[in-house]
Image: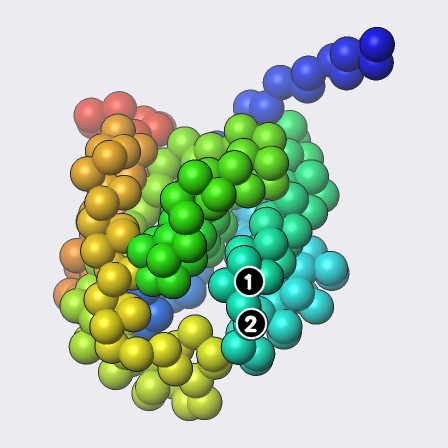
Amino acid sequence: MMASVPMVPMTGWFISLEGIEGAGKTTQTRLLADWLTQKGYGVLVTHEPGGTPLGQSLRQLLLQHKLPHRTELLLYAADRATHVTEVLKPALQNNKVILCDRYTDSTIAYQGWGRGVDATLIEQMNQVATEGLTPDLTLWLDVPVAVGLARAKGRGALDQMERESLAFHERVRQGYQYLNHQYPERMVRIAAELPIEQVFQQISLAVSAHFFGASGCQ
């Protein structure tokens, strides 16, 4: 029998940001990182896919090529497993506040609801990849699909995921709506079609309520 490995307590915070293409996650992650840094917290900003050197190579494959659905799922799981082991868990053990652009909810929304991959298979892959690591708080930046895709097109060349059909992205948004209903204690909907400042106000209030208590003071 293998000897058990002592568990190292993780004391940081894990915040994930989710949403369809063009939801504004990159901008809001930067604003949130600046806000938390000003409060004195050590912040790590990362993303999936691509949050490790191996992940960068996998990201190129995933976003530039049309892959079979199960292959796509397995590559996302490989990216996540490496990310959890090499980046997320060490950061939490060092009392960092992690801001992660996409995590397991993306897999459920995109590969599950968007692609139609079996939900049980996705759950198994997520469990293997994460070893049970779940965000303390998920900020779901919700925008109408037409708004999000228009923003994405305005950024320039589209990647493989952004080029998917309108119907695909509608299914992905429905997936996020489902997750928000299933996990209301973790996932907070942010009305992300509003001006940037108003979106961030919602985010700062949600983070304050979750981590600092009702007063938002820390």
Q: Could one spot residue 55 in this view of the protein?
A: yes
Q: Which residue is rendered at x = 62% and y = 58% of the image?
A: 75
From the top left corner, tell me how far across and down residue 81 is, in percent: 65, 44
For badge 1, the amino acid type reads Glu
Q: Which residue is mark 2?
A: 67
**Figure quadrant of residue 20:** bottom left
Q: Could one spot residue 25 in this view of the protein?
A: no
Q: Which residue is mark 1?
A: 72
**Figure quadrant of residue 188:** top left
Is 7 or 212 nearer to us in this picture?
7
From the top left corner, tell me how far across and down residue 113 is, in percent: 32, 56
Q: Earlier in the sequence, mark 2 or mark 1?
A: 2
From the top left corner, tell me how far across and down residue 51 is, in percent: 62, 56
Residue 112 - label: none
From the top left corner, tell me how far across and down residue 184 is, in percent: 22, 33
Disc 1: CA contacts within 10 A as few (<14), some (14-19) or many (>=20): some
Q: Secondary structure at mark 2?
A: loop
Q: Which residue is rendered at x = 30% and y = 79% of the image?
A: 165
> Does residue 161 lie above or below 55 as drawn?
below
> The C terminus lies in which quarter of the figure?
top left
Q: CA distance from mark 2 to mark 1?
A: 6 Å
| Horizontal side of residue 214 vs 9, given as left or right | left
**Figure quadrant of residue 186:** top left
Q: Which residue is rendered at x = 25% and y = 83% of the image?
A: 150
| Horizontal side of residue 149 vs 65, given as left or right | left
| Horizontal side of residue 36 vs 58, given as left or right | left
